[in-house]
Image: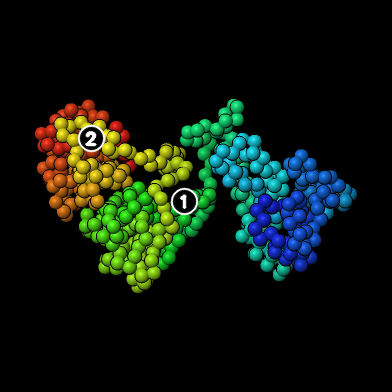
Amino acid sequence: MVEPVCRALVSTFDKEGIVPFCRDLEAAGVEILSTGGTARLLKENGVSVVRVSERTGFPEMLDGRVKTLHPRIHAGILAVRSDARHMEDLKRAGIDPIDLVVANLYPFEKTASMEGIGLGEVVEMIDVGGPTMVRAAAKNFAHVGVVVDPADYPAVIEEIRGTGGLSAATRLALAVKAFRHTCAYDSAVSSYLSRVGPRGELPSGPAPFPETLDLRLSKASDLVYGENPHQRAAFYRDALPGGASVARASQLQGKALSFNNLLDFDGAFALAASLPRGACAIVKHGNPCGAALARSAADAFRKALSCDPTSAFGGVIAFNVPVDGEAAGAIAEAFYEGVLAPAFEPAAREALVRKKNLRLLETGEFGGLARSGWDLRRVHGGLLAQDWDDAPDAVRDAKVVTRRAPTEEEWGALEFAWTVVRHVKSNAIVYALADRTLGIGAGQMSRVDSARFGILKARLPLRGAAVASDAFFPFRDGLDVAAEAGVTAAIQPGGSIRDQEVIAAADEHDMAMVFTGRRHFRH
């Protein structure tokens, strides 16, 4: 059933598109009530407006804190049109029904995130009248429309023009969106205030884990299926925009992204973003199968591919530099699920356009890996939250525990291997030079098996390479295996009760070994 729209209350902080929208409402015969800056803007642009204070007979007060909080406004919004007593109450009080509420709220989160902002300024961005109007209209969706998103203006005005009002389906959809809007707003306010100290101070360190965790995610797309075809799936992104990410990337070509594609792209993006400029990372089934640095994207790709071309087949590739025609030509020689990069040069697009199923994701420049919020994982009946494992490690400050210190070349290899190993599933072993991985042992239940597997996968000689272990070697066997393959330097957290036994093994093999004091499990 279409409910006519004869009167609209418009009060917005975000003025995007509001003038043409209200012009169209006026042209459709809708009376417009408004407040403060919105009313002033509309009048300046020739839109006829009745100020709320004229309708209520009560001036705006308290620096604008009280504008719409009045029975003449809220009764007009909340009245049930099919209830004779409600309508009689309105008539007796001389109150006109309000059929449409157009409102968006003060920018609380934007203000709260500003450097040097004071608590008082943030508190002033806690909207009261706006959420009250929005909730009132959303509650009465059987008769009243509510618009909180400027993106909805075109569809709303088109329907009003065509039918004189809004359908039940439209009013319900707008109400759902409105309640999501106010829910997210209240969540942002409570999250911020939970960090405020007794004297109004904010902690200088990371935000504490809240007593109640409210997630703000919006659906980006439904997916064809999940990890397996019998599982349903959808992709959600953070409601607030952040830096470069898989969630914010633009897909330039290729098939729709799958559940597994997104996981692999995210892993490849995280590794490429963690490495110095000029990096390429290849990921398959959640694990890196090659990473490298070079002066050109093409050379970085070829080096990364040389680590394990068999596993790389059908994987995803990430660069932290733009992809040019040469790199694209090399990629086009085999089958991959997709490529991610800050940008694709025209020659690259031309070289890859014939690979019509190849997914290309363009992220824009990403300077390092900076993830907001927490790393969240579901378990049966609950959810785990932790900080992201993004804190940088100063490898050259690691403790040298062997008779021999690493050479300059070995230090470079240790830094590269240590960066990569935190992106490999535990137990993780990475063999590397300063500019590329040579062998990766991932996800084995025994660390020595990971050490052996990494050697088995290596296609190039390991003589003179470094080995990184994401956690300590519990026995000397893993180090013995690496030494037998020609590895000359090792990096690990240390902390085993058999550290001295492992150090002695390294000295026996004339290996240099350093302890970081920090492990990087990835389960």
**Position of 396 relative to 179 (above/below):** above
Q: Nearer the viewer, residue 500 or 217?
A: 500
Residue 312 visible, this orientation: no
| Left or right: 40 in relation to 281 | right
Percent x, y of residue 44: 76, 59
Residue 182 visible, this orientation: yes
Question: Residue at the spot x=23%, y=38% of the render?
Answer: 491
Question: Is label 1 in a helix, a strand or a loop?
Answer: loop
Question: Residue at the spot x=18%, y=28% of the render?
Answer: 500
Mark nearer the N terminus (1 vs 2):
1
Percent x, y of residue 276: 33, 50
**Picture disc at residue 243:** 1
**Position of 150 relative to 164 (above/below):** above
The residue under label 2 is: 514
User: Which amino acid type is marked by label 2?
Assistant: Val
- Graded by Cα atoms within 10 Å as few (under 14), some (14 to 19) or many (20 or more), the crowding at tag 1 reads some
